Structure formats: C-alpha cells, structure tokens
Image: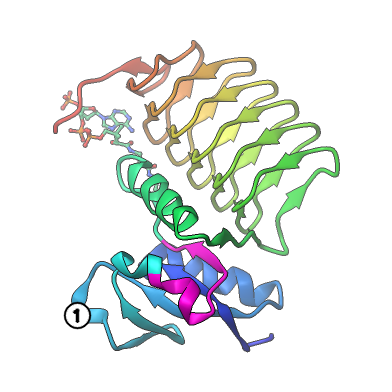
Amino acid sequence: MNESVNASCVLIGVGGHAVVLLEALLAADRAVPAIGLDGDAELHGTVQQGVRIVGGDDMLPEMPRLGITHFVLGVGTGSDTATRRRLFENARAAGLNPLDVRHPSSLCSPSAELGPGIQLLARGVVNAQAELGESVLVNTAAIVEHHCVVEDHVHLATGAILCGGATVRSGALIGAGAIIKHGVVVGRNAVVGAGAVVIDDVADDAVVAGIPARRIERSR
Ligand SMILES: CC(C)(COP(=O)(O)OP(=O)(O)OC[C@H]1O[C@@H](n2cnc3c(N)ncnc32)[C@H](O)[C@@H]1OP(=O)(O)O)[C@@H](O)C(=O)NCCC(=O)NCCS
C-alpha cells in the first residue's frame, strides 16, 4: 500500500467514517490527506490515523493559503445528512474541490454517472445508467440498481438497496439494510429507518420505518 501523504488535501472530520475513508484511499493505492479539521478542540494539535489535526472547520477559508486545493468529508451521518451538506458547501465556498473516494472492491457501471465528491465504499455497487449527484455516500455494500437517480448529499447506509429506477431526492438518508422498491421516489431530506422496506413514495422530510415502511414520529 502507498502510505504517502497528499499535501494538497484536507480531511474534514476525523471520526469513525474518516477511518473507513482513509483505509479506502490506501487500499486504492492513493495518498491520505496531510491535514485534518475537527470540531473536537481536544484533537487539535494531535495526529489521528496519520493525519495532523490543525483546527476546526472554521479554518476552511484559510486552506487555500496553506496550499490546500481538495477536501474529503470524513463525517458520516447520524440521524440526518445536514452536517455533511453544510461542511461540503462551506468547503466549496472556500474554493476547495471534493476528492472522490472509490474503494477498489466497489463496482461501478461504465454507463453510470457519478457526481463530484462521490464516496463509493467497499463492495458498494452502482449499476447501469444510474445517475448520482454531488457528495453522494454509497456506504459499505450498498447497492444502487440500474436507472436509479440519487441526488446531491444522499447517504445510502451500509447494505441499503435501491431497486431499479428508484429516485432518492437531495439530502435523504436511507438507513442500513433498507430496501427501496423499484420506481419508488424518496423525498428531499427524508429519512428511511434501518431495515425498512419502502414500497410507496416517501414525502419530503418524512421519517419512515418498518416493513412495509410507515411514517413514524421521531423522539426529538
Ligand atoms: C428511523 C430512525 C431515524 C428513528 O430514530 P429516532 O427519531 O431516534 O426514533 P426513536 O428511536 O425515538 O423511535 C421512534 C419509534 O420508531 C421506532 N423505530 C425507530 N427506528 C426504527 C426502525 N429502524 N425500524 C422500525 N421501527 C423503528 C421505535 O421503536 C419507536 O417506536 P415507539 O414510538 O413505538 O416506541 C432511526 O431509528 C434509524 O433507523 N436510523 C437509521 C440509522 C442508520 O442506518 N444510520 C446509518 C449509519 S451508517
């Protein structure tokens, strides 16, 4: 494996998801970011997974002056995708470009279209003529079947399956192991609970769970 450092790239967030990303970069024989930013002040000045943490994400505007041209989003998704979207947009506003991360064990059809900042992790699959927007996270072993449309900032969690022709609107979170039936549309910023089977369209901002998936009220 190539353990060299990419001096022009910053890692944003150094939690569990970041570790997975760094290992995906190394598995693909690519260099890891030289520096990182994280909201936890106790990490500032430390080295995490070989990445030197120089401060919080409020430092993003200073990155170009340090010779940084690219970023990788190291934050995953807790209960929604808002943090990933905010950090991505802030990094773009600072003039940085997203680095694509594709694990060598992932599969992507040559007829699929991937937007900038794609994170296609181990054993993730993107099948024929699927269209993915910017900063889409296809997590470990998630599957995007043929002719699906996946808009910006969507997170397909581990093992989620989008059957053929499904659409997932911007910012939605599809929970681990969930299945979205062919042709179904999941609305903007909607959340599909882990293990759900979604057989009908999901409204914008709705939270659904269960088999078949039904709308639920969140605890917060
Ligand atoms: C659906 C989800 C967002 C709800 O979270 P929440 O707002 O904290 O909701 P709560 O845990 O308070 O649960 C609310 C109700 O829904 C039920 N529920 C929660 N998640 C459920 C799920 N995945 N399937 C079925 N029922 C679920 C709870 O049992 C509870 O029912 P009750 O009111 O009868 O007691 C969350 O449970 C979930 O599944 N998130 C996806 C996590 C994931 O896969 N992340 C990816 C990381 S890689």
Does any atom of ligand 1 lie closer than 8 Å to the CB of label 1? Answer: no
The answer to whether residue 65 is magenta is: yes
Figure coloring: rainbow
The part of the image, by quadrant, that contains residue 18 is bottom left
Q: Which residue is mark 1?
A: 42
Mark 1: which secondary structure?
Answer: helix
**Rendering quarter of residue 98:** bottom right
Instruction: Classify 163 as above or below 82.
Output: above
Amino acid on which disc 1 is placed: Glu
> How many labels were placed on the picture?
1
Where residue 113 appears, as percent x and y from the top left, is: 75, 39
Q: Position of residue 68 (x, y in %)?
A: 53, 75
Query: Residue at 45% across / 53% down in the picture?
Result: 93
Which residue is at the front of the view, 184 or 90? 90
**If the picture is divided into quarters, which one holds ligand 1?**
top left
Is residue 82 placed above or below 1 in the rendered structure? above
* Most foreground residue, 123 or 146: 146
Residue at the far right: name it. Answer: 110
Residue toward you, 64 or 191: 64
Q: Is residue 144 above or below residue 15?
A: above
Residue farthest left in this picture? 220
**Residue at 39% across, 36% down:** 194
Eyeballing the image, is 212 above or below 179?
Answer: above
Q: Which residues are magenta?
A: 62-74
Q: Is residue 164 visible?
A: yes
Q: Residue 34, can we see it?
A: no
